[in-house]
Image (cartoon, grey):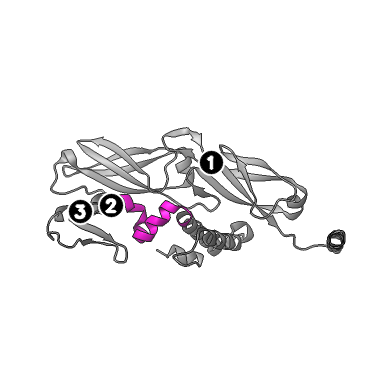
Amino acid sequence: MSDYYSMLGVTRGAADKEIRQAYRKLARQYHPDLNPGDKKAESMFKRINEAYEVLSDPDSRKKYDKYGDQWKRADQIKAQYGDVAGSPYSWTYRTGRQGRRAGVDPFSGLGDLLTDFGGFGGRRGRSASSRRIEAAVEVTLEEAYSGAARQVTISSAGSDRRIEVSIPPGVDTGSVVRISPGGGQELLLNITVAPHKRFIRKGADLHTDVAVPLEDAILGGEVEVRAMKGKVSVKVPPESQNGQRIRLAGQGMPKLGSKDTRGDLYVVIRPKMPTNLTGEQRELIRSFRALRAGEEVTSHVNE
């Protein structure tokens, strides 16, 4: 997995503002609307979105700094291996392994260590009544928005059983869905939401860049925006600046456990510079520039 800091071109100790500026610069460079048909740019856009999504959130960044590419499992690692008093094991970021704490019996708790995260295999040496089964599940942002179903195969008493599980609306990366499939088992689905090429998610809020013709950014206008529920028309205020945000209340993600409560969608204005100008258009812009220069001169004289 690529290092998120290197991907954005910043150091590990970079301030939030520096990370945000680096992301915006790269997002403009690789945005699909500005690179139509360029698969490499589209892939890079997804990767820098993923990096920014993690590093812009204080809690996710803290986990990433400590656990590296295992940051999504931070809570599980803490629960199973330590960073709590009395645990014989602690997490080592550089090796990605569990190391024994000093002064602790090297064989105490070895049974738990050998089970690791075990996938669908459960924990050996434990009774069926306490067996916990874990599975990693990736969903799209659309599935996280509306909920999804997955087919999961679990093993019990030497036989496989296939069950359908429901993933509720509002899940996010790091969410754990707990299911009781019967037989004294507990199924834990560790959720990862795949990066989206259009939206950046921050909790229940969504952010999306929208290219706006320069004349509309100056004079005001309307632009069509794709929200999760479909296309919506958004009014662009006159003299909108690059990076200016327009809030669409209730157009974000549902909140886990309360699907009728939704976050907001923030439309980020990106004025699009015109190309292939005609001679007449260029002349109009020259006139506009001259008028602006005259206004500045008059303003200085009056001062």
The x and y percentages for residue 86 are 19, 52
The answer for how far apart the CA atoms under marks 1 and 3 are is 40 Å
Contact between labelled residues 1 and 2, with CB atoms less than 8 Å apart: no
Determine which residue is flagged by label 3.
87
Secondary structure at badge 3 equals loop
- 73 left or right of 3 in image: left
Q: Nearer the viewer, residue 249 or 196?
A: 249
**Residue type beneath disc 1:** Gly
Circle nearer the N terminus (1, 3): 3
Determine which residue is flagged by label 1.
252
Q: Nearer the viewer, residue 176 or 21?
A: 21
Q: Residues within 10 Å of mark 2 (few under 14, many from 20)?
A: some
Identity of the residue furthest to the front in this view: 303
The answer for how far apart the CA atoms under marks 2 and 3 are is 10 Å
Circle nearer the N terminus (2, 3): 2
Identity of the residue furthest to the top in this view: 260
> Image point 26% across, 62% down: which residue?
97
**Residue type beneath disc 3:** Ser
Secondary structure at badge 2 equals helix
> Image point 29% across, 50% down: which residue?
76
Per the rendered image, the range of residues in magenta is 55-78
Circle nearer the N terminus (2, 1): 2
The answer for how far apart the CA atoms under marks 2 and 1 are is 31 Å
- 128 left or right of 74 in image: left
> Image point 60% across, 63% down: which residue?
29
Q: Nearer the viewer, residue 250 or 35?
A: 250
* Vertical position of residue 146 compared to residue 241: above or below: above
Quarter residue 156 falls in: top left
Secondary structure at badge 1 equals loop
**Residue type beneath disc 2:** Lys
Determine which residue is flagged by label 2.
78
